Image (tube, coloured by chain):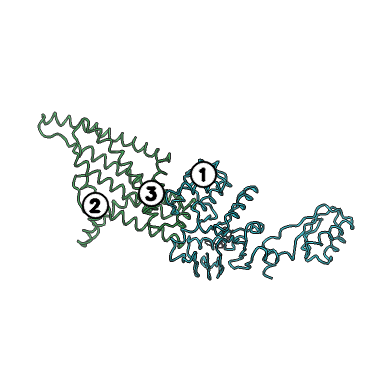
Amino acid sequence: MKPTLTIFWKELKGHLTSPSYYAITFFYTLLMSYIYFVQLRSFSQRSLQYMIQSQGRGDGLNLHQQVIAGHISFINLIFLFLVPIITVKYFTEEKKARTFDLLLTSPITATQIVMGKMMAAIAATWILVAISLIFPVVTSLFAQIQWGVLASSYIGIFLLAAIYASIGVFASSLTDSVLVSGFMGIILCLFTWFVSWGSEISENPLMQEIFGYLSIAKHFGQFIQGSVEIVGFAFCFSLIFFFGFITQRVVESARWR
Amino acid sequence: MIEITNLTKSYGTLKAIDRLNFKVNKGEIVGFLGPNGAGKSTTMKIITGFMPPTDGMVKVSGFDVFEDPIEVKKRIGYLPETPPLYTDMYVQDYLAYVAKLKGVTKGKVKNGVDTALQKANLQDVRKRMIRNLSKGYRQRVGIAQAIVSDPEILILDEPTVGLDPKQVAEIRTLIRSLAGHHTVVLSTHILSEVQAICERIIIINKGKIVAEDTLEGLNRRMSGVTRLVLKIKRPNQEFEKSLKDMSGVVHCSGGHGLYSLDINDAQSMPEKIAEHAVKSNVGLLEMKSQDMNLEDIFIKLTS
Ligand SMILES: Nc1ncnc2c1ncn2[C@@H]1O[C@H](COP(=O)(O)OP(=O)(O)OP(=O)(O)O)[C@@H](O)[C@H]1O
Ligand SMILES: [Mg+2]
């Protein structure tokens, strides 16, 4: 456990002292502010229209559905590309600088190396998710927020970010080229959204069910709708575990090449 | 301390090392001498558990490198050919990180870092970023990271590469001072380096051990032949011929006033040759002894 934490802290500190991480955070926040503001503005205009039309009857429009859900989906969209970029250095740089040799000749196991790095990658992306929480919290100062649904949506995006981080780390273990690994990471992240399309082509009802289970859109959708289900957790954790496992295999096999 | 049996490594069809057998005892400084591509780095990578051999066995402190890699790696400090440096870290943070990776307990990390900085003479740059260091300093940080965990065994792959002569001398002194407390295996292709540092020398060529001896033993074997370089102002055929025919000159090559002579007696021959040159009135400009290169040594040692 101790070597895992040593690697975890080193990687995390690496992010927190790296100008590029701050630059990424800055532009991510800027973009998010813009999108959130536009969505909130159009929501308030629509609300006003709705109030006039319905003459004050009814509950009004749903802030969560119209703004928060959009906000979170937007974070997801950015993360598909951003997280593989943040995590791409994890192994590619070690291989380029030959520091991988240091790790492989230290008294630590491949599992510890991968766990330390995955934890750091997840932490680095979770910081970005946490920053995005500012927007709903500030909104709550002048509008009513459904905290329960907000919480479950955020559980969803935290889990998704962790999946992308584990995919990103896996991709970076494959080559020593930042470009190739980054590209593969993005493709793999996108692919997780399209796996379930397999159900369209399969005739077998069992296969259809399996593909249905593999649908990240379905599980994520449920979190956003406010329903926290065990199966959603199980799906996300098994994906993270899966990518952690195959990364461990790749690192272990590096010795044999 | 280190026991190597029938160690073989093939890269595809190329045999980088071929059935190596040797032992390194506790506290010894062993030099691994060989020309480029001899298989020095390959052997070291296998000892450190970086990569597995194709065949054969390595035991370190009684532990098999492939059955107990963690135990072995705890005991080894390794400086690879390319120092494994995180260029975006500060020197002292980097060393502390390596110490923790090597399993140094928390309370001892600071002390280990300070000692390593002091031994590698890096105190002035401890707060500098590695990226901004010169090549020689980086090499020293590489040495510092190998000793930071105070390991029983040090494996140093060409430790003085890229250093200026003063630093080379310093590092050699440092390595010599490590003997006794640490067991050191270092590789080099410079004969004078092993002569300056090592107690025992293993010479390897094309993946095979060609000689294994103590420093005195090797010097004795080498003492038979010395090489002289002779420079004269007015070369003529007659003088060249007389040089070649001189008794005691094993081999003479060169021409146009610059000659390389292998002589069999370093004590009396230089004097004789100098006298001969003066007598022949060819204008003696320079005469000096020269280190034989590795190829010559192999030919000598293996013939
Ligand atoms: N990864 C590799 N793949 C294929 N061949 C390799 C590899 N690494 C080394 N070799 C070959 O193995 C042989 C021994 O290489 P090694 O690096 O051990 O030599 P060396 O004695 O360290 O030489 P140098 O003094 O140049 O460092 C060389 O012929 C080299 O080309
Ligand atoms: Mg080498």
**Label 2 chain ID:** A
| Distance Cα–Cα, label 3 vs label 2 | 24 Å
Image location (x, y in percent) of residue A91: 43, 52
- Residues beneath discs 1 and 2 located on the same chain: no
Residue occupied by mark 2: A233
Instruction: Give the mark nearest the N terminus, 3 or 2.
Output: 3
Residue occupied by mark 1: B130
Q: Residue at x 83, y 62 (%)?
A: B243
Q: Residue at x 63, y 50 (%)?
A: B168
Please state which of the two labelled residues, at mark 3 or mark 2, is closer to the viewer. Answer: 3
Please state which of the two labelled residues, at mark 1 or mark 2, is closer to the viewer. Answer: 1
Q: Determine if the C-beta at disc 3 is less than 8 A from ligand 1.
A: no
| Distance Cα–Cα, label 1 vs label 2 | 43 Å
Residue occupied by mark 3: A8
SS at mark 3? helix
Image vertical order of residue B2 relative to residue A215, above or below: below
Q: According to the rendering, which colour does chain A have?
A: green
**Label 3 chain ID:** A
Image location (x, y in percent) of residue B156: 55, 56
SS at mark 1? helix
Q: Are marks 1 and 2 in contact (CB under 8 Å)?
A: no
The amino acid type of the residue labelled 1 equals: Ile
The amino acid type of the residue labelled 3 equals: Phe
- Residues beneath discs 3 and 2 located on the same chain: yes
> Which chain, by letter, is cyan?
B
Q: Tally the numbered discs.
A: 3
Image vertical order of residue A237 relative to residue B223, above or below: above
**Label 1 chain ID:** B
